[in-house]
Amino acid sequence: MQLTTVILALALLWPVGPPPPEILRGWHPPPGPYAAGHRGVDLAAPPGTPVLAPADGTVTFAGPVGGRGVVTLTLTGTGTPPLRTTFTPTTPLVARGTHVSAGTPIATLAPGTHCPTSCLHWGLLRGENYLNPLLLTPRPRSRLLPLIE
């Protein structure tokens, strides 16, 4: 199943809002699996902001990693291996195994971040491959303007 087809089939929302949040740091994939890079995007939001499920899915992890709260959501109907989206630093509101609908609060943004101001780090993976989570964001439809001579 192609990623484009999967994304078009999802009901997609921004994980923090009001939409769209300011993107403090974009996705910069590393040249190799162990190289430096930014394997997600950082979205501006103050501590305590609800973190929403961007699509229907099942919570496959909710707990601490390296002293920071992380929630991982495996997205429904996204092929094999399925897409997984991650959020940190968070305080989880849901337990592992919980099925959630798009827009359901799954966590709150916790203080303590790698950004100059408070932010949510949002990641996206298929298997072990990191992808740009902005692929999941709603985009305005393209419109062609009439040719004026």
Image (spheres, rainbow, N blue to C red):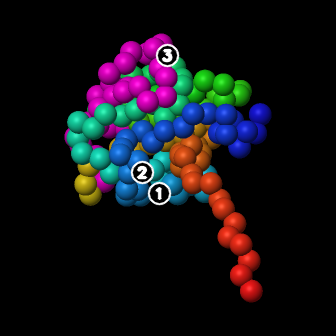
For marks 2 and 1, give the one nearer the viewer.
2
Residue drawn at x 49%, y 16% is 99
Chain-order first, disc 3 or disc 2: 2
In depth, the one of 29 and 14 nearer the eye is 14
Badge number at residue 20: 2
- Cβ atoms under marks 3 and 2 closer than 8 Å: no
Q: Is residue 35 left or right of residue 141?
A: left
Which residue ends up furthest to the bottom in the rendered image? 149
Badge 1 element: loop
Q: Is residue 47 visible?
A: yes
Residue at image position (40%, 32%) is: 52
SS label for mark 2: loop
Q: Give 147 or 137, whichever is nearer the viewer.
A: 147
Q: Which residue is mark 1?
A: 26
Mark 2: few, some, or many residues within 10 Å (few <14, many ≥20)?
Answer: some
* Mark linked to residue 94: none
**Bounds of the magenta span?**
88-115
CB within 8 Å, label 2 to label 1: no
Q: Secondary structure at mark 3?
A: strand
Point out residue 93 in the picture as x, y percentages from the top left corner. 32, 21
